[in-house]
Image: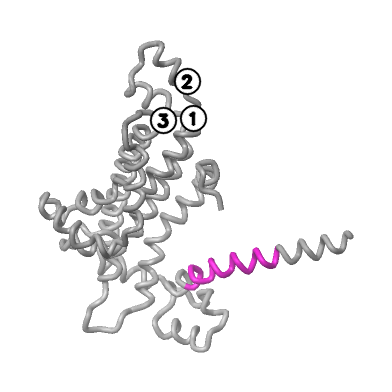
């Protein structure tokens, strides 16, 4: 019986290692390739060898070229401003909408919620042209605000927070109403402090989505000085020259590193929020 448990444990461990390896191998290849020159990079993958995942003769020339030829620091700052603003506005609007749908009774509340969720099914490609017309009509094209504003009303965020608000006991709010508290005071003083984990989870998801956005910033912004990091990396090469893949991988590493650090710091809140808000795997 003991040997069976040992074999089962070893099998589970092997499966976990295999899954982790499948997810980490591409990122390890990108990071390792960022420290190689063009010739070494291709020699290590044709044929594929273990050297593809480890920088044997490491060089930082790709990073020097990246920071010299591309305004990476400005692009990172722009991306951080867009992501931070989008997180703040998304949390504000989604929490207020979730409170309205769970605590304020009005005709058609369920139908309104259903319509909002249906918009989540629309692909971004179908929304691109009307969104561009609306944002341009507001005079927000070619601006950081124009990048973030179409996505602050998140159907997913509303769903996540609505599930969290419905799990809160209403007795606390009834006691506050007896003391004369209105909706504003109840919302900020009672409801929000009790949904910190779902709010943090939504903030993390929104930050990841905003940081990784590429198509919409590429369409709405033409000024390189206010472009986000993903577009800046994609546009670093010249159309008349072959791409320098080592430099491209260096840019991808720089762009991904803040997300990796953020997720490592907040992963327990992300997991807890997803499991306690009605979204269980």
Name the colouring of the figure. Answer: one colour
Q: Residue furthest right?
A: 1
Residue 73 position in % (x across, y down):
29, 57
Residue at the image position 33 percent from the left and 79 percent from the top: 244
The circle on residue 55 is none
Of label 1 and label 3, which has the lower sequence position? 1
Please identify the quarter of the rendering in which residue 180 is found: top left
Residue 133 position in % (x across, y down):
14, 57
Left or right of residue 72: residue 265? right
* 15 vs 28, nearest the viewer: 15
Residue at the image position 30 percent from the left and 63 percent from the top: 214
Measure how far apart labels 1 and 3 are at the Cα level: 10 Å
C-beta proximity under 8 Å, tags 3 and 2: no
Does the stretch in magenta take in 93?
no
Q: Residue furthest top?
A: 179
Residue under label 1, please give it: 168
Residue under label 2, please give it: 172
Q: Quadrant of the N terminus?
A: bottom right
Please identify the quarter of the rendering in which residue 67 is found: bottom left
C-beta proximity under 8 Å, tags 2 and 1: yes
Residue under label 3, please give it: 192
* Magenta stretch in the rendered image: 13-29
């Amino acid at each position: 019986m003991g040997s069976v448990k040992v074999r089962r444990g070893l099998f589970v461990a092997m499966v976990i290692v295999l899954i982790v390896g499948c997810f980490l191998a591409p990122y390890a290849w990108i990071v390792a390739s960022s420290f190689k020159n063009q010739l070494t990079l291709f020699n290590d993958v044709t044929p594929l060898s273990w050297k593809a995942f480890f920088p044997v003769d490491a060089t930082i020339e790709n990073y020097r070229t990246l920071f010299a030829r591309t305004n990476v620091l400005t692009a990172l700052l722009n991306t951080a401003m867009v992501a931070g603003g989008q997180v703040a506005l998304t949390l504000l609007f989604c929490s207020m909408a979730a409170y309205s749908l769970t605590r304020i009774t009005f005709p058609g509340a369920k139908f309104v919620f259903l319509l909002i969720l249906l918009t989540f099914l629309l692909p971004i490609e179908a929304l691109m042209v009307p969104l561009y017309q609306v944002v341009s009509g507001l005079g927000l094209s070619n601006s950081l605000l124009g990048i973030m504003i179409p996505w602050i009303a998140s159907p997913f965020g509303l769903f996540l927070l609505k599930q969290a608000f419905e799990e809160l006991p209403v007795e606390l709010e009834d006691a506050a109403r007896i003391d004369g508290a209105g909706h504003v005071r109840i919302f900020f003083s009672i409801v929000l402090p009790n949904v910190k984990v779902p709010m943090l989870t939504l903030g993390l998801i929104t930050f990841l989505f905003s940081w990784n956005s590429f198509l919409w910033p590429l369409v709405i912004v033409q000024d390189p000085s206010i472009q986000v990091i993903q577009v800046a990396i994609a546009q670093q090469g010249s159309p008349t020259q072959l791409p320098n893949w080592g430099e491209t991988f260096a840019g991808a590493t720089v762009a991904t590193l803040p997300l990796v650090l953020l997720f490592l710091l907040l992963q327990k809140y992300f997991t807890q929020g997803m499991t306690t808000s009605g979204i269980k795997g």
